[in-house]
């Protein structure tokens, strides 16, 4: 879901021109004419050349590390002026992690939940059916409790660094779209209904997380991509990775928002009823799963997740599902656009 961003003064940096053409130009025009990117030393792609609001030096969106997808709203400071540092790791302390994610107190992350593991194995077995009738699979938590704590701490690190509260549900805040607006029947072209069995699998995933039986995912910080997510164990095709969560709002309220992770919830026949998920204040691990560069063949090859919107008990929900087997250590990627092709992914790695 692409946020519409208007060009601001700091992005209007024309290509460098010869000294002869400066005759009659004002000092301000000369300043813009001489602007170039500090990384690639080029003044090309002027509409994507940001000027720091502190030092006035220029940087292309696609030359920054981590890259920026769109022009930020409000003040922007370049890496040297913002003194960006590697995020401080969340303390690997069980009680702090339990409190952060509001894990049920009856659950002890240092012990295996035998009943939960047995139930997971039983459900997974019933989901192995013919390809025509394939059912969604629940994730399989890492067996090592200490490793699960590390997985949870990695997400807590990313959420803390971005000033985001953890939420594993869609949230409806005052002044935004009410829950009653989440009505799948207004989706243009209709919306597929999640089957009863797949709904049970989704609920099983939610219940496991509430008990501290975390999905096998690790959030890491990459100098080029920023926060990104890796599989911390083998994940089978058709496994539910996570649900996309955050604040639900009308698209019309967010058309000029610079949020880099907004997700379409409902694309309605009446555009005024279209909804988006905004994970900038409250979200889960879905916010840190990156998109592919769908403008290149190599980018498409990296895609290992599919984003699917379902009617779940009368409300629209967005799920990220493995679309092939994913080996341990592989980073997770999906196509932000789906079939809409509105989000600018040409600068994605």
Image (cartoon, helix red, strand yellow):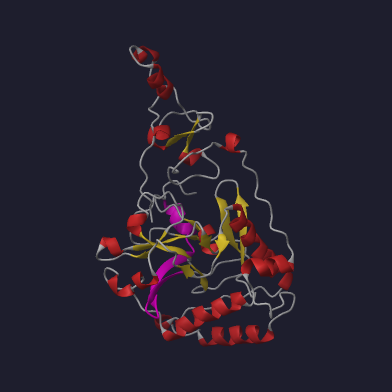
Residue 300 sits inside the magenta stretch? yes
Which part of the image, by quadrant, shows the N terminus? bottom left
Residue 144 sits inside the magenta stretch? no
Q: Residue 18 lies in what quarter of the image?
A: top left
Q: Residue at x 50, y 33 (%)?
A: 53
Q: Is residue 209 left or right of residue 338?
A: right
Q: Residue at x 46, y 81 (%)?
A: 199
Q: Is residue 151 left or right of residue 250?
A: right
Q: Is residue 228 left or right of residue 112?
A: left
Identify whether 44 is placed above or below 320. Answer: above
Q: Residue at x 68, y 66 (%)?
A: 97
Q: Camera-side residue: 252 or 133?
A: 252
Q: Is residue 341 visible?
A: no
Q: Residue 74 lies in what quarter of the image?
A: top left
Q: Residue 189 lies in what quarter of the image?
A: bottom left
Residue 181: give x, y in percent of width and height: 34, 70
**Numbered disc total:** 0
Q: Is residue 154 visible?
A: yes
Identify whether 315 is placed above or below 20. Answer: below
Q: Camera-side residue: 248 or 67?
A: 248
Identify whether 68 is placed above or below 339. Answer: above
Q: What span is colored magenta in the figure?
A: 296-323
Residue 260: give x, y in percent of width and height: 46, 52
Q: Camera-side residue: 175 or 271?
A: 175
């Amino acid at each position: 879901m692409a946020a519409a961003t208007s060009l601001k003064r700091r992005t209007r940096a024309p290509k460098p021109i010869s000294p002869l053409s400066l005759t009659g130009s004002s000092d301000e025009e000369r300043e813009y004419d001489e602007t170039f990117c500090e990384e690639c030393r080029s003044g090309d792609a002027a509409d994507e050349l940001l000027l720091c609001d502190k030092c006035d030096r220029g940087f292309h969106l696609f030359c920054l590390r981590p890259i920026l997808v769109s022009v930020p709203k409000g003040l922007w400071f370049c890496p040297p002026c913002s003194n960006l540092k590697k995020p401080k790791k969340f303390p690997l302390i069980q009680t702090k992690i339990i409190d952060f994610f509001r894990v049920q107190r009856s659950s002890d992350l240092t012990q295996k939940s035998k009943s939960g593991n047995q139930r997971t194995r039983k459900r997974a077995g019933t989901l192995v059916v013919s390809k025509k009738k394939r059912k969604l699979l629940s994730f399989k938590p890492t067996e090592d409790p200490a490793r699960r704590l590390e997985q949870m701490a990695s997400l807590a690190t990313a959420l803390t660094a971005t000033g985001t509260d953890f939420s594993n549900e869609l949230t409806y805040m005052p002044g935004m779209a009410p829950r009653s607006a989440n009505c799948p029947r207004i989706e243009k072209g209709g919306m597929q209904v999640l089957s009863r069995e797949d709904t049970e699998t989704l609920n099983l995933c939610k219940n496991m997380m509430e008990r501290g039986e975390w999905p096998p995912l690790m959030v890491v910080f990459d100098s080029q991509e920023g926060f990104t997510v890796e599989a911390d164990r083998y994940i089978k095709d058709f496994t539910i990775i996570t649900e996309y969560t955050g604040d639900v709002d009308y698209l019309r309220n967010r058309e000029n928002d610079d949020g880099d992770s907004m997700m379409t919830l409902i694309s309605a026949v009446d555009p005024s009823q279209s909804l988006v998920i905004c994970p900038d204040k409250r979200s889960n691990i879905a916010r840190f799963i990156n998109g592919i560069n769908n403008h290149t063949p190599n980018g498409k090859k990296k895609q290992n997740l599919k984003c699917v919107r379902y009617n779940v008990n009368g409300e629209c929900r967005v799920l990220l599902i493995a679309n092939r087997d994913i080996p341990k250590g592989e980073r997770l990627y999906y196509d932000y656009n789906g079939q809409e092709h509105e989000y600018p992914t040409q600068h994605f790695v």
